[in-house]
Image (cartoon, grey):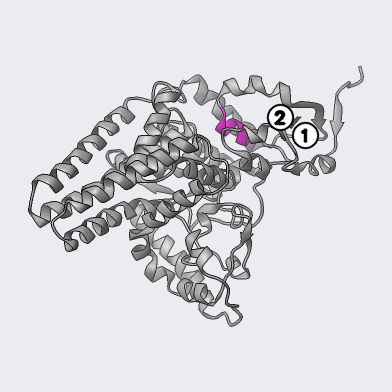
Amino acid sequence: MADSKRYISKTEFETHKKPDDLWISIQGKIYNVTQWSHHHPGGPLPLLNLAGQDATDAFIAYHPGIAWQYLDKFFTGYYLEGYLVSDISEDYRKLAVEFSKMGLFDKKGHGTCILLTIIALLFFTCVYGVLCCDKTWVHLCCGGLMGFLWIQSGWIGHDSGHYTVMSNKNLNRLAQLLTGNCLAGISMGWWKWTHNAHHIACNSLDFDPDLQHMPFFTVSSKFFNSITSAFYGRKLNFDSLTRLLVSYQHCTFYPVMCFARINLFAQSIILLLSKRKVPNKGQEIFGILVFWTWYPLLVSFLPNWYERVMFVVVSFAVTGIQHVQFCLNHFSSSVYVGPPNGNDWFEKQTDGTLNILCSSWMDWFYGGLQFQVEHHLFPRLPRCHLRTISPFVKELCKKHNLAYNCASFWKANAMTIETLKSAALQARVLTNAVPKNLVWEAVNTHG
């Protein structure tokens, strides 16, 4: 019996990768998601980055089983000619099914409620220390507690952006606004916009915003050619001043991380004041206004300018630990230029990530990101299960001769500094850096 299916060639399929003509393939079936991209919860960018290619593994990674039933309304009636599944993708999909059968995606534990309680206690301790104590050392300790509070609230913000950490979506949204916008001054809308792009295009120099830190840092000499950021839609100019800063980036890394929070504040405000569509923009702006009301007000109650400045510096420096942690997971890993490729999803996610070795009693410190490989492969998985699935992921990597990258916290720091130093030494020997405008680059740095 003749095959009645209608097929489309790979060459023709690849032409449908524009905002007004956006097709993707999932398990060999072709879907037109042009109109849906404007309503996609993850934004249009992940779809655009995978347009004109197979997106099956990415779809499995980011969507619960219930999402499959909605695909039919986007089906074009065409199938991808010559569609094949690689051995590693087949094993990855089987593993995702097994984890789903085990109920791991639904069992969240009570970690979030416990952490929210701890955050509340930390907040009121800081407020009490500032308002009711007159000792300088107490005020400085309160600044440190505030930084630690921001770190822990950041983990909840991160988790709630990947899966529902509360009992329902409304409470999950409330947790996002409280821990992200109101307590930390970071727009969850901004975070989801950049973080989704990071996960889809992990360690792509021109598509992953988490590697685009000019003028302060570059992890590869490829940035010296002033590559164009597909995320920001502009050229990342490697000018003479950028060259100077990059030449000493291995020395300035930790000092800059101490104040990296400022950039996240700026990025949040810039996005919310822009014309870009941001879901629940009114809520986002309200949350940021709450932060910029209580935090300056709390600082103002300190007795003198010395203590006020030191309180802010200490709180920023402590939360800088989290910014360092983010960098350790990716800076020293493999990088590439170009869009992500849906056909090597597993390989790209493992190559571009680094796990941090630690004992289980230290999991609170890393917020689950010590299992960065597992998190990138299964981003919807609650972090309380990442240690559980680690042996399965490690075995799958071993089966397919792929590196399962991991290092101690101190070794990861050394690897990151070595990566920065290598790029810095190459920058010093350049002789053709052309001066450009630095201001826009500085404003659009984040990390």
Of 362 and 235, nearer the camera is 235
Residue at the image point whose x is 71% and y is 33% from the top: 35
Element type at mark 2: loop
Residue at label 1?
A: 83
Left or right, 295 with respect to 411, comes to left
- Pick the quarter of the image with the N terminus: top right
Q: Position of residue 181 (x, y in %)?
A: 38, 41
Q: Is residue 214 above or below residue 268?
A: below
Q: Looking at this rendering, what residue extends furthest in the right direction?
A: 2
Q: Looking at this rendering, what residue extends furthest in the left direction?
A: 134
Q: How many marks?
A: 2
Q: Earlier in the sequence, mark 1 or mark 2?
A: 2
Tag 2: amino acid? Gln
Is any atom of residue 439 visible in this view? Answer: yes
Q: Position of residue 278 (x, y in %)?
A: 53, 40
Q: Looking at this rendering, what residue extends furthest in the bottom direction?
A: 431
- Pick the quarter of the image with the C terminus: bottom left
Residue at label 2?
A: 27
Tag 1: amino acid? Tyr
Q: Which residues are magenta?
A: 57-63
Left or right, 166 with respect to 40, comes to left
